[in-house]
Amino acid sequence: MTTPLEGLATIVGPGNMLTDPTDMAPYLIEERGLYRSSAQAVVRPGSTAEVAAVVQICAEAKIAMVPQGGRTGLCGGAVPAGLDRAIVIATERMDRIRVLDPVDFTMTVEAGCVLASLQAAADEAGCLFPLSLAAEGSCRIGGNIATNAGGTNVLRYGSTRDLVLGLEIVLPDGRVWNGLKSLRKDNTGYALNQLFIGSEGTLGIVTAAVLKLYPRPTERQTALIGLPDSQAALTLLGQARRASGDAVTACELMSRLALDLAVRHIPGLRDPLGTPSPWVLLLELSSSRPGGLREALESVLSQALEDGTAQDAVLAESGTQRQALWRLRESIPEAQKHEGGSIKHDISVSTSRVPELIERASAAVADALPGARPVAFGHIGDGNIHFNVSQPEGADKNAFLDEWPRLNRVVHDIVMGMGGSISAEHGIGRLKAAELARIKPDLDIELMRRIKTAFDPDGLMNPGAVLIP
Amino acid sequence: MTTPLEGLATIVGPGNMLTDPTDMAPYLIEERGLYRSSAQAVVRPGSTAEVAAVVQICAEAKIAMVPQGGRTGLCGGAVPAGLDRAIVIATERMDRIRVLDPVDFTMTVEAGCVLASLQAAADEAGCLFPLSLAAEGSCRIGGNIATNAGGTNVLRYGSTRDLVLGLEIVLPDGRVWNGLKSLRKDNTGYALNQLFIGSEGTLGIVTAAVLKLYPRPTERQTALIGLPDSQAALTLLGQARRASGDAVTACELMSRLALDLAVRHIPGLRDPLGTPSPWVLLLELSSSRPGGLREALESVLSQALEDGTAQDAVLAESGTQRQALWRLRESIPEAQKHEGGSIKHDISVSTSRVPELIERASAAVADALPGARPVAFGHIGDGNIHFNVSQPEGADKNAFLDEWPRLNRVVHDIVMGMGGSISAEHGIGRLKAAELARIKPDLDIELMRRIKTAFDPDGLMNPGAVLIP
């Protein structure tokens, strides 16, 4: 009689079954260092059939499984923290593009493909795969799908959910569900695909997907715009969407403090705007239609400067200038590290209520932790703000970070009161599972538990993520 | 002790509770006349609270419920056929637009709103609600959501699923689930919203929804194009998507026979093309960006005429001409009625495989029913063809229609072999429930049943639709 571990080694081959703590260590690292994990083994299957066989053995032996992609998630969903002797199932070896069909505008890919490699393959075929986020150089598409990843192009192309046409899933009992279809329309029963997307590996393991492609943009126009208030960002966004034929592909808001911190701490950055306006907007338009985008953006901006919606604006005149504008936005989290502790919020509300959210949350933070400095920035076009709070100047970092749960509560209660979300794009994982249980209505949790039980009655698939067992 | 019916009358008021067969008759009519239904009562609640109270009484008394919108579905999902003494719950009185927010680009509406009234409200606010289909003058948004309705704008804007941000649902036990959020990003657990969309009233009743709006197009260009083969439609579509910045909002293919039947039977129609090409494409581009769309379309067409992708083309020069082109496409089902019986298929495959599908299905039909005439037309840009088969000339209509199940099988087996769908946009309802059970893998049916049981353990919500009890 073979043991489960012997069985796993037979399936994936001894070289792809790690049990030595040193070998396993890289697979147990969590992006933010919030969790310490241990595992019985890390297995690296090379095919869907191997994943299925691995899961079948674990299911029969009632061993908890943690699916793992690029380990770039920010909520601890991909590491076996708090679990006793779980098996990590890493998809990294499954990194083939099975088909890329530019006529169908789709590609069929395996779960372990790195996001940037998919963007590159699409580009080579004259197409665009629009999912784009900070971790794109190492995150893997299976993880993007499991967490319904967002990023900077959601405004125009939607979240990962909107980019997935079909899925192949290994279910918690090891059977393979084949929903790997390239269909733009399919109304034959319940949307099983949709249920797996964003379920963070708690209902099954994504092994492959059919993804939507788009025409590759041939023109791109980027502007940095100084604004008198955050409301002006929404006015400008609406005008730019209309004037450009809905070609706005990024709309990123930064508070003056957020921008100043980036310029202060990150070498080589400078603020190209002459006016120190309280808010700054990075607006980007792109289209595969040749010509006309620059004129559309200029016309919106000149009108906005005239009527006071904008106080100042610069347009990128080259790819280098465009990158410099983007670096201002992308450097904010790094810059915050130089200011001591930062308590983070990944929140969303109706797009039209973002200004109200920022105002109310800032006031509540000032009340709760005098001197703490809200650094608001993010995807205002999606109603999604990374409302990160830097510690008071000169305060003790650890004492400040101890306030994380209390400050989260203060901010999340405002968000929930506004019908918003406490995890707009990063998911729940282990980090927010308790907070989810606190803020979601009991009925939501009950329905989610019923689904979990229907798919994974033994609770073996990524236990502790999303739902507290 | 009051009876359930007395309880229902108290909730909705005697005037909104129908039990007389004559009063109920309009609510039992099924679009195609395929079903005869009877019901214990038809209730017309005026609010979500009334729907909840009605459902609670039915759930306690174990009475089957059939949610009903505009009764325009083509698969019998909204009538209580084959049910013993069910209650029809008609949402028609719930027809308020609760909020329309042009800054947020959303509207919050009740389930009973007629689709055309939502389109009009969006238009008045300078926005577009893109869902558009033949029944838009009488179908209701709750039904559109329950069936994940498709239509002519899916290519650019997606199906109903892609247009819904939030839902309010009365669950099978009468509790109200509040997912009525206007969030572009929300990664807090399983996608419950998505599960209800397209579940055809078998998991709960849609009472309200938050819908996405888009900038209202200011320019629209429409062309009718003669093609040498159906493959050319895909070539042209790709070129037009690229040249226009993805502004192609309709791409409708018609076979020569389909077009000829429309011209022959529908008064006032004429074929504006000089060349009797074997295939004809209706291509429409629209955008809120002023100018440039005509030039983009003309450039694609002149190139296509030069390289033989197109044989002939006309561009609409006015709104009247545009409507005339659209009437050719929209008259095809009506024209088919003049040719006797028509056996219908609402099928989809990968967009790039539509030509192969048409070829294989046509050959199989010729084999199975010599003389029967495939009339292929539809949304080629979505891979969705209404492959309708007209009877052989001079054949007996009823004898031909008796072949419906056999011909469906022939065509559906080809579709399934190509990884396609046997109901691309019309849903399953009662009409295709048996066929669904035949063609879906057992695992799909099992997973769907587990979900059904998790949400509706007593099987009271629209029994017989989608899944055979």
Image (cartoon, coloured by chain):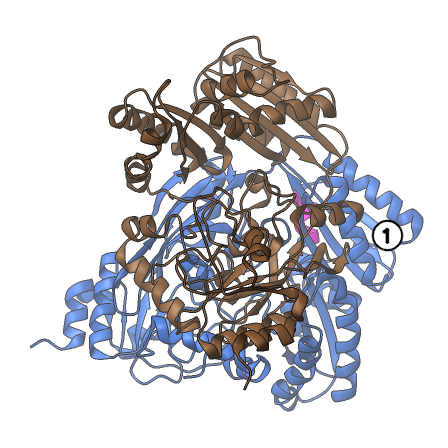
Chain colours: A blue, B brown
- Label 1 sits on a secondary structure element that is strand
Which residue: 86% across, 61% down? A276
**Residue A320 in sight here:** yes
| Residue positioned most to the left | A1
Q: Which residue is mark 1?
A: A312
* Residue situated in front as seen by the camera: B206 or B301: B206
Could you say which quadrant of the image residue B180 lies in? bottom right
Residue drawn at (32%, 51%), measured in percent from left and top?
Answer: B434
Viewer-side residue, A293 vs B45: B45
| Residue A101 at least partly seen | no
Q: Residue at x 86, y 55 (%)?
A: A274
Q: Which residues are magenta?
A: A319-325
The type of residue carrying mark 1 is Asp
Magenta stretch: includes residue A164:
no
Q: Position of residue A77 (x, y in %)?
A: 44, 73
* Residue sitting at x 46%, y 50%: B76
Left or right for B26, reference A373: left
Given the image, what chain letter belongs to the residue carrying mark 1?
A: A
Q: Position of residue B70 (x, y in %)?
A: 59, 51
